[in-house]
Image (cartoon, rainbow, N blue to C red):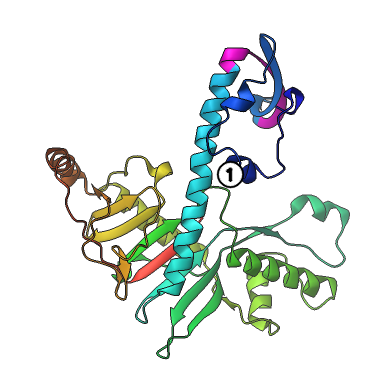
Amino acid sequence: MKNIGVNCLTSPDKYVESHEEGIEEDLEKIRGDKVQYKQWKRVKMNDGKERMKIVDIEKGKDEFKDEMRYQFTEFREHVSRVKAQYSAVRKMKDQLPTNHVLVQMDFAENYSCQNLDEIQSAYWNTTMVTLHPTIVYHRQPDGTLVHSSYVFVSFESKYKVKASWHYFEAGHGKGPCDGIGGTTKRNADNAVKQGKATIQDANDFFAWACSETSSNIKYKFIQTEDFEVTKGEVEQRTKVIVPVKGTMKIHAVVGVADGTVRTRDVSCVCPECFGETGFKDTTSCHWDVASLRKNEAQAQSTACQSSAAEPNSTDITENTINVTE
């Protein structure tokens, strides 16, 4: 686009904001019957694996215009979802009731174990440690919003805690969890470099973390046995549940009853949906309903189709709000 005189801003978001009426004016600047450009694409390598590489592409002018219109529309909707989810999280924090918690969690890039003085061959046998930084927000009786920082914290629905889940738009989940993960790995690296710790695996990492006094982060170690037990439970659940359609487009999930959830493309924290008791039992805003039980899914689908023409209120109830990328 730069080659045809279009002012391409460094920030794609700013480009969208400056083209609220669309990109037809920019597309009219295209001259010639062919357009050549570069694009990131998955390319199959000689070893059979696919890797992302920049490739040269040539398309006819009309085909290129159609592609640009489609890409611009998709990206504009993407930017809208990014803003909506960040806004929803801020509102949930501001309005969080005293008997609710808001849990924001993420997956941190694996920590690479290292030693202060290691032999050369050790470089090729690096052990990775998985980190899941989590922040839990809650409001004290005096109304003050406080938070606690954790690593390796797990939440299970078997504890009968009503919950809702809110997901950031893909690629836009930056938040305080990233700070926790970065601080944890930096402190671990410093401890190794200063000779205060030897971290060769997850057990060593946890042992160092328990002795760490320079931060307020709390750590919980997930044993392999714990993982296997949970894996078995999940496998049993998948035998009696069905997936929700359009999962990749859903950014808000609310547990309504055992085996039933309500979903939206973006979270809604308007006064109609969210208040002093959390998400309200009824709301005039639109939420889709889905049954997760195999023997109820078909009946639920039929019922939804028969009542699609009638606007109904939506029941929503939960006490835990989970926010994740």
- Image x and y of residue 182, in percent: 69, 65
Left or right of residue 286: residue 95:
right
Evaluate whether residue 98 shows in this view.
yes
- Image x and y of residue 127, in percent: 70, 57
Residue farthest to the top, as pictured: 33
Left or right of residue 83: residue 57:
right
Q: In which quarter of the image is residue 317?
A: bottom left
Left or right of residue 217: residue 167:
left
From this view, report whether residue 159 is shown above or below residue 27. below
- Give the structural element (helix, strand or loop) at label 1: helix
Q: In which quarter of the image is residue 62?
A: top right
From this view, report whether residue 246 is shown above or below residue 60. below
How many numbered discs, if any? 1
From this view, report whether residue 204 is shown above or below residue 65. below
Q: Which amino acid does label 1 sit on?
A: Glu
Residue depicted at x 54% and y 38%: 75
Is residue 251 highlighted in magenta? no
Residue depicted at x 46% and y 69%: 103
From this view, report whether residue 309 is shown above or below residue 206. above
- Image x and y of residue 180, in percent: 63, 69
Evaluate whether residue 48 shows in this view.
no
* Residue for badge 1: 17
Chain part drawn in magenta:
51-63
Residue depicted at x 17% and y 48%: 311
Q: Name the residue nearer the viewer: 200 or 261.
A: 261
